[in-house]
Image (spheres, rainbow, N blue to C red):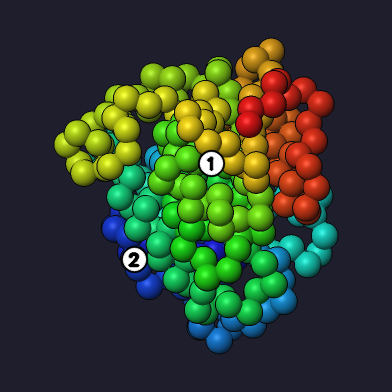
Amino acid sequence: MSLYVNLRYGAVGGGLRTDPYLIEGDGRVARPAMTSLTAAQAAARVAGRTVVFTVHGFNVSYDSGLRSLARIEDLLAAHLPSNFLMVGVLWPGDFIIPAINYPGEWRDAVDGGKALARFANTTLSGAADFCFLSHSLGGRLVLEAAAGLERQAARVCLTAAATDDDCLESPYDATVANSRALTYLASKKDMVLKLAYPIGDWAGDVFLGDKDDALRGALGRHGAQWPRTHQPKAWGFKVDEALDFGHGSYFPPSKPADQPKASHDQVARFAAAFLRGGSPVWPRLGPYMG
């Protein structure tokens, strides 16, 4: 059985809810039956545990989110102590027409992160620690959530982050400051971030009110750019190009017939080593990126 924070109105479509609650069920099956937990039950589940929020990216439906996050939970659990509790985060990043509605999804990611932080600060405040692991646009949600915690996040791990490559300097220097440590994985072989991100980010900035830089590349492709400062608590790695890591190489697939690949276990091992408090370890990482 897996736990999830529900940030969605309705299982199919619907918008973002700002009153999150926990749901529980087997997200691995084709037609999962989920049970809602009361605030008291949610508080009891996380009390004294290190909670790891796992966050999917854009173009992930409710059922797909359940399945992919249950699979990343299984991969992480193999490498983490029993006091770690994985909690998936379901947010409404569904596509209608990907090239059209992607630019506006930054708002759901940002608002979802703020809602998750409030939920952690109140209902889940009995947790021993909060950690985060994200994929793609889920990184924006995580950066907002970690910045909004009323305590420092223990560890923040971003994969293929669909955020600007200077965002850790501004505006998410607040996230770095409110985290004990932050790391990320980036890949030059990520064609989604190479081709789709610049267009969607530009449209979101120019037409839909996003206030980052309309002309930056993605953190999950280029790594962090530090034009003015360096953040000693934040470091990341470029995946060796010979490994051919694309956008789907980080989190397990959501289709029932598609099974996790070796790359998904590599990422889980990398994340687990970091979440446990150690340095990220992966022999085939490319150059350190400060």
Q: Secondary structure at mark 2?
A: strand
Left or right of residue 289: residue 274: right
Q: Amino acid at mark 1?
A: His
Q: How busy is the neighbourhood of tag 1: few (under 14 within 10 Å), some, or many (20 plus)?
A: many
Q: Is residue 254 above or below residue 90?
A: above
The residue located at (27%, 42%) in the rendering is 210
Q: Which mark is drawn over residue 135?
A: 1
Q: For residue 53, what is the image quadrant?
A: bottom right
- Residue 186 drawn above or below residue 230: above
Which residue bears the numbered disc 2? 17
Residues 133 and 30: in front is: 133
Q: Relative to the observer, which residue lies in front, 4 or 137?
A: 137
List x then y, in percent, for residue 173: 49, 47
Residue visible at 50% across and 41% down in the picture: 168
Residue at the spot 66% in from the left edge and 24% down from the top edge:
239
Q: Is residue 39 above or below residue 13?
A: below
User: Where is residue 188, by image quadrant?
Assistant: top right
How packed mark 2 is, by other alpha carbons closer than 10 Å (few <14, some 14-19, many 20 or more), is some
Q: Amino acid at mark 2?
A: Arg
- Kindly identify the residue that appears in the image at 82 percent across and 60 percent down: 81
**Looking at the figure, which quarter contains the N terminus?**
bottom right
Which element is circle 1 on?
strand
Question: Which of the two labelled residues, at mark 2 and mark 1, occupies the earlier sequence position?
Answer: 2
Residues at circles 2 and 1 in contact by the CB criterion of under 8 Å: no
